[in-house]
């Protein structure tokens, strides 16, 4: 039975990081089931879910020692399949846009957590507006909502938070 491993890596961005990591995984007959990778400032961040044959797990940590000696922070965490944990919960897309300022992510995530809503994925960015150069914030993500929660109550409250923050909040059914 394969082991599911969450691998995280952070460190200075350079060409070949993904090649180095996936080389180790392939040499151990592993597979990348899902991943997210991005450059943040001058740093590179990677998050992967890998499946590895049981007998290949031992020594995997040591295989990344050379990358650690180059300054990369790498963690390996065995995980279990929890796909049944949110069975029956309803998925929704959330999009937030507007002028960037402190606290947007916190206020939105705080409301979701207080309602018992789980964030499945969330991507945020800030970029200068084309004409004015004003920083514009964008958040896009998917949440899963307990079936007993009233959609209008939690989504309207989220939109009210957006109004207070002077950002647009849109909630829709995942397509």
Image (cartoon, helix red, strand yellow):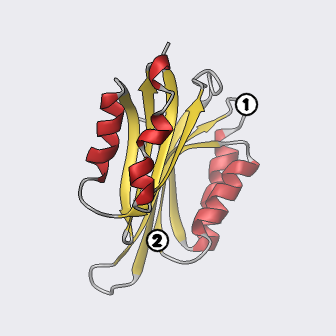
Q: Nearer the viewer, residue 37 or 124?
A: 37
Give coordinates of residue 134: x percent, y percent: 39, 84
Q: CA distance from mark 1 to mark 2?
A: 31 Å
Between disc 1 and disc 2, whose residue precedes? Answer: 2
Give coordinates of residue 4: x percent, y percent: 51, 27
Graded by Cα atoms within 10 Å as few (under 14), some (14 to 19) or many (20 or more), the crowding at tag 2 reads some
- Residue on which disc 2 sits: 98
**Would you place residue 5 above or below residue 168 in this image?**
above
Q: Is residue 36 left or right of residue 167?
A: left
Give coordinates of residue 82: x percent, y percent: 61, 25
**Would you place residue 137 above or below residue 86 in this image?**
below
Can residue 118 be seen?
Answer: yes
Mark 1 in CB contact with mark 2 (< 8 angstroms):
no
Graded by Cα atoms within 10 Å as few (under 14), some (14 to 19) or many (20 or more), the crowding at tag 1 reads few
Q: Is residue 155 left or right of residue 12?
A: right
Q: Nearer the viewer, residue 138 or 159?
A: 138
- Residue on which disc 1 sits: 148
Residue at point 51%, 32% (across, down): 5
Residue at point 67%, 29% (across, down): 147
**Would you place residue 145 above or below residue 31 in this image?**
below
User: Considering the numbered disc 2 on the image, is that residue within a helix, a strand or a loop?
Assistant: strand
Residue at point 68%, 33% (across, down): 146
Q: Which mark is residue 94?
A: none
């Amino acid at each position: 039975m394969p082991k599911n491993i969450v691998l995280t890596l952070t460190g200075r961005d350079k060409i070949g990081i993904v090649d180095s990591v996936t080389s180790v995984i392939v040499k151990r007959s592993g597979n990348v089931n899902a991943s997210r990778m991005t450059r943040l400032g001058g740093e590179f961040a990677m998050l992967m879910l890998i499946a590895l044959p049981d007998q290949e797990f031992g020594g995997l940590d040591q295989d990344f020692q050379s990358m650690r000696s180059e300054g990369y922070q790498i963690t390996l965490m065995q995980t279990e399949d929890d796909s049944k944990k949110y069975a029956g919960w309803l998925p929704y897309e959330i999009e937030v846009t507007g002028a960037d300022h402190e606290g947007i992510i916190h206020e939105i995530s705080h409301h979701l957590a207080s309602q018992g809503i789980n964030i499945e994925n969330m991507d945020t960015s800030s970029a200068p507006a084309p004409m004015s150069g004003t920083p514009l914030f964008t958040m896009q993500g998917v949440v899963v909502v307990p079936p007993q929660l009233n959609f209008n109550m939690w989504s309207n409250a989220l939109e009210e938070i957006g109004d207070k923050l002077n950002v647009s909040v849109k909630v829709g059914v995942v397509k």
